[in-house]
Structures are given as structure tokens and as C-alpha cells.
Amino acid sequence: MTGPETKAAIEWLTSVAPDPGACRWEWERNPQGIALLPAGRRWDVLILPGELGYPTLDVLTRLIDRPGPVLADFGESRMGFFVPPGTVSRWIGTGVRGCGQGTWIVVPYPGRATGGVRWLIPPDGSGTLTDAALLELAMHEAAGAAARDARGAHEGWDPREGRSES
């Protein structure tokens, strides 16, 4: 990220904090480089398990040039997709968690590698978010590809024998 992009991203992210100036000041000096920010104001976050999140991001980046911000939590193997506010209250999906109004999310400082939480696609400060319908389409395509791969891995498997037919 460039200097102006980082500054714009920081302004956009901290704008949701109860005290944006204090949040920015603490964030810049925090050795962990993370802030706890409220969801549901400018964005909601849909959290997918990594095994679905990474292929979903691959599909999404083939569909659109630049999706909204995406976080990865490598310690928990989860990914957070920033979507429009209100999405979480309408979302129904097995295995997908949501952070919306009344919840908080750990956010790393843009452009800085910090612990296990990192930006895969950092915010650019413009307010770009991933369209929830497009994210759902990408999730279905990624899940379908995973199911096809799993079926292909089991072709030739004879459960009565407990081994592959060759």
C-alpha cells in the first residue's frame, strides 16, 4: 500500500471508533499493531473457515477486479470478508459467522504485518466492500469445486474392500 492509501485506510477504519483520534493514536503506538473496532457501522464482517475462505477469495478475484477488504486469522484459520452493514442480520449460512451491529472485530494496522491477523486485501480507504450476493455466489462455486474434488478423490474406492480398485 502507498502512503496516501494507508492514510485513507486508517481514516476509514478508525472513523467507526467511539473516539477516532484516540483510536488512531493508540493503534499507531500499539506494539501488536491491532485495534478492536465496532462492526455494523460502515461494514459487517462475514467470517468463513479457511478451507472455504481461501477458495472463495480465489473465485471472487476472478469475478471482480478488487473485492472489499479481507482479513485472515492464521491462528484460527479463518477469513473475514467486509460486506455492507446489515448483511449479517439477513445472512443464513452454515459454518459462517457474522460480526454486525453490537459486535467488535480485531483489525490489524494497514500495511503492517502483525501476529496471526493480517490483511489479504487491505482497505483502500474508499469504502469499497464486497457485495454479499457476489460473495455468496463465490462461496457456492468454491464449495462445489471442493465437493467435486472430494468425489474425484474417492473414485475407484470400494468401501466393501477398504481399498482402491486398480
Image: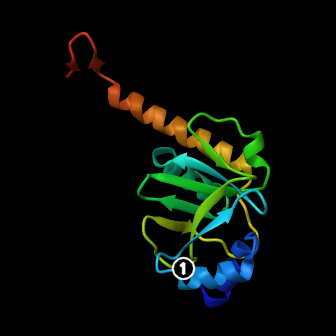
Going 38% across and 30% down the picture, which residue do you hit?
Answer: 152
Residue 149 drawn at (x, y percent): 42, 35
Question: Looking at the picture, which amino acid does disc 1 mark?
Answer: Gly
State left or right for residue 77 relative to residue 56: left
* The quadrant where residue 106 appears: bottom right
Going 43% across and 58% down the picture, which residue do you hit?
Answer: 74
Q: Is residue 65 visible?
A: no
Query: Which coloring applies here?
Result: rainbow
Residue 31 drawn at (x, y percent): 47, 80
Q: Is residue 137 above or below residue 57?
A: above
- Element under label 1? loop
Image quadrant where one finds the N terminus: bottom right
Image quadrant where one finds the C terminus: top left
State left or right for residue 17 relative to residue 26: right
Q: Camera-side residue: 120 or 86?
A: 86
Q: Camera-side residue: 56 or 83?
A: 83
Q: Is residue 15 above or below residue 88?
A: below
Find the residue positioned furthest to the bottom: 3
Q: Is residue 83 visible?
A: yes
Mark 1 Cα within 10 Å, few/some/many (few <14, many 20+)? some
* The quadrant where residue 139 appears: top right
Q: How many marks can you see?
A: 1
State left or right for residue 46 relative to residue 146: right
Residue beneath disc 1: 111
Residue 80 drawn at (x, y percent): 58, 55
Residue 90 drawn at (x, y percent): 77, 40
Going 33% across and 26% down the picture, which residue do you hit?
Answer: 154
Going 61% across and 38% down the picture, which residue do you hit?
Answer: 140
